[in-house]
Image: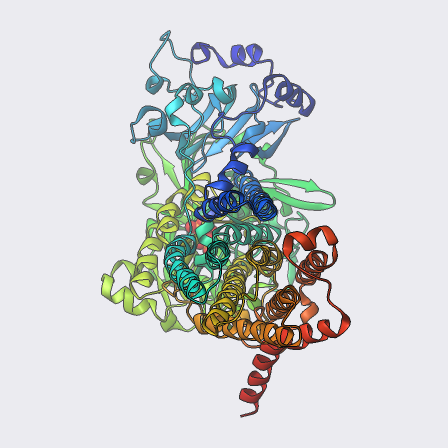
Amino acid sequence: MNFHELKQEEVETRLQTSIQRGLTTEEAERRNREHGSNELTGEKLPSAWLVFIRQFKDFMVLVLIAATVISALMGEYIDSAAIFAIIIINGLLGFLQERKAEKSLQALKELSAPQSLVLRDGEWKKIQSAEIVAGDIVKFSAGDRIGADVRLLETINLEIEESAMTGESVPVEKHAAPLREETPALADMKNMAFMGTLATRGNGTGVVTAIGMKTAMGNIASMLQDAQRAETPLQRRLEQLGKILIAAALFLTMLVVVIGLAQGHELYTMLLTGVSLAVAAIPEGLPAIVTVALSLGVQRMIKQKAIVRQLAAVETLGCTTVICSDKTGTMTQNQMTVTDVWSSGKHWRISGKGYEPKGKFFEDTEEISPASEKSLYQLLTFGLLCNHAELKRKENEFVIQGDPTEGALLTAALKAGLSREQLLETFTIEQEFPFDSKRKMMTIVVKDAHGQRFAVTKGAPDVLLNKSDYILWNEKKQLFSNPYRKQTEDILQVLAGRALRVIAVAYKPLQNTSKVADAAEVEAGLTFIGMEGMIDPPRSEVKQAIAECRQAGIRTIMITGDHKETAAAIAGDLGLSGKKSDILDGQMLSQMTEKDLEEAAEHTAVYARVSPEDKLKIVKALQKNGHIVAMTGDGVNDAPAIKAADIGIAMGITGTDVAKEASSLILANDHFATIKAAVEEGRNIYENIRKFIRYLLASNVGEILVMLFAMVLGMPLPLVPIQILWVNLVTDGLPALALGLDKAEEDVMKRPPRHPKEGVFARGLAWKIVSRGFLIGTATLIAFIIAYQQHPENLVYAQTVAFATLVTAQLIHVFDCRSERSVLARNPFGNMYLIAAVVSSFLLMVAVIYIPELQTIFHTVPLAKREWLLVFGIGAIPTFLLAGSFFARKRR
Ligand code: ATP
């Protein structure tokens, strides 16, 4: 289609849309139904069948299949069929777990999918980019990824980086005028923006000409994203560990088999025992449960509004030692209200709350009419002209569309009775240099009714103070020399010291009529007019969250583009150090060497007036000092720092696509407290993984030891192979999963962060596994010996007692795994999933013992009440011994 050649009206007609009002919602839905979603058909979920088949590729399953064949060849068809059934059940469980993990990861991907701003029913709305249809009017600005192919309608300094399409990484300047060439190369289509490319500067609006596979990007098949799934460090470590355990298990198994054979046991029995023990010892199921635990944890994080983009981040979150957070909007509400205005040495106050355009003006305590104060009126007028924000009423509440800082200036002007529409009848805006965090200013070039041209600049007061040579004092332009300058600086200190964000306004008359080439040309030699100070109250939960982080050994650092004094005042309110020596600003930063910064980074609590580039320096300095750094950001220029941080955090609402793509975590609500919640959840997930590793491995150790001890003592086999398989593959699985869903221990945010290099078995886990395994194995053996001595003629009976004791001991021990300290440290009913899992695992065992058909398969006999007493009594010993030793230690 030759959209690039058409005039705007022609594009509008061709695509049957309205540039003013966009499509209606119904029409957009109809087009979506007709043409499908705006998606590149990329990687699909592997089919269910494939995932099921995948379950049978494990080493363990191969061992089991060998066992099935051996038993069949020996004529033991029941054993053979039972093992086969266990293989299938195990495969099914693995399949269900993997599907669950897969699905939640997919849901996650969708949550963090890009969004676009579209005009529907005359209103700008944010929607999932996948819902864009041809004919939609879309708007984007620096940092946004373009959601579909777009013919541009309006651009302001728009530059787009098209390397994804053309390989050219230098951004291309775009404009909205029709092109004449018939079929220019993609790179020359200056009035088109393409799906998947990135706006790096300015902003633009356009109409969507193609979606999904019909876009230029859709044509380039190789552009389909490479969706390799990265494993988390823990998963990798577990895989390595798995190999070591396989070796150890095979060695132990061989030992049991050799001793067994030497003791005169049958070859077939010993072979099958060997296989079962090998299966018991190899924690093949672990990686799968770890993935499930990670992905379920990720789901819980979503509920807390933290969207994890990389699974590895879940682990790193738990190791975080420093959180560097933006101030505005993350720690504060981003609900800006102008309370103070200063110009020509006069100081006015404005009443009113939030963005409601209702308030009065006061000089000292006396109410004044703003229209009668010329300097005030001019300041408010320019603040309104150099401004894109719009005020909307939503269910009795006034909300701002656009930048909240500009929203505050808009509201203040409305309170004085000004209106943008009226102003635009007198003033024509000819050019604009949008705000960016580096310049900290925004400038427009305006022509008034007399044809007089001038520039209006608004921005950070300290920056404007430097750029101004004159000041407007009682409507007269004066040289901005000392008494004036001192007075201005003093009042700035006062306002900023009250935690107000201050915006200064200045102007510059332009003599000639030529177009201004760049911002620097007009943003110098300015005439200072005055300042507006706005409050942005801290979010209520931030102070508490910072305090909790401190208890958890995590330092919080505030990073802001705002003025030093403003930042210090808010930091003080939030319980961060507001001490002078703990605050650095961009200028001080620029004079520091890397070494200086590393030193200062250890105690600096606030970085003020920093540009996004400085954030990268801060991250690097902290990392050099051994910190695990979480860093927030939203703009295009924040991306390098977000990428470099151990946990890069992007804002879900105000964040640009570039920031989101660089991040590993997105805050759906932009709140600081969400970071704390995510860290807490990250710690909890890791602890839960440790819990079930401990449970599964201790159970395995118990199973191996009971067999090994019996062999060494020259006794009969306490468990038959099929029982070992059953315990290991069926009864252990559910409780382990339930441990993965456990709530955090009360003190999880009172401990220092975990070291990222910490091994899986750190903090005494290896000892716990071996000692608990030893106790469980010994208890089972004791139960077996007692039962066997009572009825030496009835081995099946003694084996059933051993089987029941082993399962019971494990199911009691699982409660001990919930705490790093002791089984007594936690309420056993605190995790209802675990109760349900334990009850069902127990019932499964009871079924195996009492259902006659299963008795033949599992070599069991029914047990009487007295035997159950034995089973419970001995099964509980390991855990009670541990509880007792905890008590004894506590008393000492
Ligand atoms: P934080 O870093 O705490 O999140 P921020 O992101 O709002 O703050 P910037 O957006 O970099 O910080 O703003 C830096 C400074 O630029 C502000 O302190 C303010 O003085 C000025 N400023 C902010 N928004 C605008 C705007 N729309 N027009 C002109 N100046 C602005």
Residue in front for this viewpoint, 726 or 2: 726
Given residues 45 and 115, the one toward you in this image is 45
| Image spot of residue 423 (x, y percent) | 56, 34
Q: Position of residue 184 (x, y in %)?
A: 34, 12
Counting from the top left corner in percent of width and height, residue 822 is at: 57, 77
Q: Can residue 550 be seen in this view?
A: no
Q: In the image, is residue 399 above or below residue 237?
A: above
The answer to whether 787 is drawn above or below residue 219 in the figure is below
Q: Quadrant of residue 692?
A: bottom right
**Which residue: 53% across, 71% down?**
777
Relative height, residue 286 to residue 390 (above, below): below
Q: In which quarter of the image is residue 453?
A: top left
Q: Residue 766's x, y, as percent?
A: 44, 70
Q: Residue furthest right?
A: 865
* 420 lies above or below 353: above
Residue 849 makes an appearance in the image: yes
